Amino acid sequence: MAVLPIRFVPEAVLRQKARPVERIDTILLRLLEDMIETMYEARGIGLAAPQVGISKRVIVVDIGDGPICLINPKLDELEGEEIGPEGCLSIPGVQGEVKRAAKLVARGVDEQGRKVRIPAEGLLARVFQHEVDHLDGRLFTDIASGIRDGTRQGQEEEEEEEVEA
Ligand code: NI
């Protein structure tokens, strides 16, 4: 496994619509492993392939219950609304409040090619929405309110919550 370099705004790959995965091969499995390691190293709770420069529809998520890999993810059965803080590993230091669906079902294929269906709410639902947005070239700052840049304010307190994704 290897830690991959994270791409930061305004790199073009972050604004591209990522391509669906057509085949799960050793290259893709290696990418998934490396993305998980990269996410942990960066202390994030989610990572999408475009954030490591790969324009493919692949995300990894871990909100503390172990890693989830989702290939060609789709979100449906979105319900409710919740506003909460978000940050992004590709936009260091910046946080904002984002309105997201409170509940959803994430569907896709896992690393073994099996169809998966993951009901999610709260933080997990939020991270899925944040990561799938990355696959469509959308960043949380496009839809956030109250955006604040901790890097400009200098000595800000430690992040109150782990929401980097
Ligand atoms: Ni992000």
Image (tube, rainbow, N blue to C red):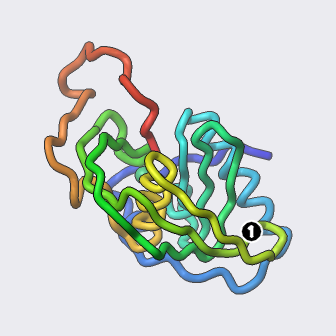
In the rendered view, tell whether residue 105 sits above or below residue 157.
below
Some atom of ligand 1 lies within 8 Å of the CB belonging to the residue at label 1: no
Q: Where is residue 44 in the image (x, y as percent from the top left)?
A: 53, 39
Q: Specify whether 99 is left or right of 50.
A: left
Provide the secondary structure element on which disc 1 rests.
loop
For the point 23% across and 44% down, which residue is it?
Answer: 97
Residue that protrudes farthest toward the front in the picture: 80
Q: Specify whether 39 is left or right of 27.
A: left
Q: Where is residue 63 in the image (x, y as percent from the top left)?
A: 58, 41
Q: Which of 55 and 23 is in front in this view?
A: 23
In the rendered view, tell whether residue 21 sits above or below residue 94.
below
For the point 18% across and 42% down, which residue is it?
Answer: 147
Instruction: Write down the quadrant of residue 89 in the picture.
Output: top left
Instruction: Write down the quadrant of residue 25 in the picture.
Output: bottom right
For the point 37% across and 17% down, which residue is it?
Answer: 158
Residue that protrudes farthest toward the left in the picture: 146
Q: Where is residue 164 in the image (x, y as percent from the top left)?
A: 44, 40
Query: Is disc 1 surrounded by few (<14), some (14 to 19) or many (20+) residues within 10 Å?
Result: some
Instruction: Write down the quadrant of residue 31 in the picture.
Output: bottom right
Q: Position of residue 137 (x, y in %)?
A: 37, 70
Give the number of marks. 1
In the rendered view, tell whether residue 78 sits above or below residue 149.
below
Q: What residue type is labelled 1?
A: Asp
Residue receiving disc 1: 110
Q: Which of 7 and 42 is in front in this view?
A: 42
For the point 42% across and 38% down, which residue is it?
Answer: 163
